[in-house]
Amino acid sequence: MKIVTVAAIASLMLAASPALAQTSTNPSPLAVNPTGAAPTWYTAHGNEMRASKLIGSTVKNDANESIGSINEVVLGKDGKVAAVVIGVGGFLGMGEREVAVNFDALRVAQDANNRTVISLDATKDTLKAAPEWRWAGDRSNTTGNGSAPTRQPVAK
């Protein structure tokens, strides 16, 4: 009899647990989506590229010389790419300085092997003479819990 009673109590507890879990309050739709607009789903287009493929890419000049590599992609408040931060000079990250270039100044194309080629009408010396890009705050904070970094070019 004890075994039957224990089994019955255990069965009732298991059956009641999903009902208890469903009694939590849901946040109002305005708390989750303050505009009240339904999400719109995006479909990729053929002329787009991923930021992850831009970062680390070599930037070449019109003479096909390597003049730096893209370290960061900077987004504007509207969500569009505003600039890229290019690492110039140095060796294996040592002694490298960063400069920001408006995204519109880059030319992005595909070569004969369907690889992305990024070029800029500049020389290494031009980039070395450009104002150095510095981030205010910790740019490694990508969790959304801190304040956004602000850009501050350094005057020479």
Image (cartoon, rainbow, N blue to C red):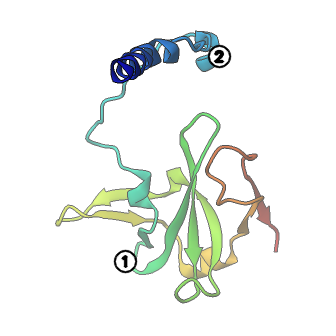
Q: Which of the labelled discs sits on residue 64, or is there none? A: 1
* Quadrant of res 48: top left
In the displayed structure, does residue 118 sit left or right of residue 87? left
Q: List the residue tagged with mark 2.
A: 31
Whether 28 is drawn above or below 78: the answer is above
Residue located 62% across and 48% down the image? 143
> Where residue 155 sits in the image (x, y, percent)?
82, 69
Between 40 and 120, the one nearer to me in the picture: 40
Q: Amino acid at mark 2?
A: Ala
Between 21 and 47, the one nearer to me in the picture: 21
User: Which of the two marks, 2 or 1, is nearer to us in this view?
Assistant: 2
> Where residue 16 sits in the image (x, y, percent)?
44, 13
Between 29 and 63, the one nearer to me in the picture: 29
Residue located 61% across and 76% down the image? 126
Mark 1 residue crowding within 10 angstroms, few (<14) / some (14–19) / many (20+): few
Q: Secondary structure at mark 1?
A: loop
Residue located 73% across and 52% down the image? 149
Q: Which of the labelled discs sits on residue 83, or is there none? A: none
Q: Could you tell me how far apart the alpha carbons at marks 2 and 1 are, in whole angstroms?
A: 52 Å
Quadrant of the rendering where the N terminus is positioned: top left
* Quadrant of res 45: top left
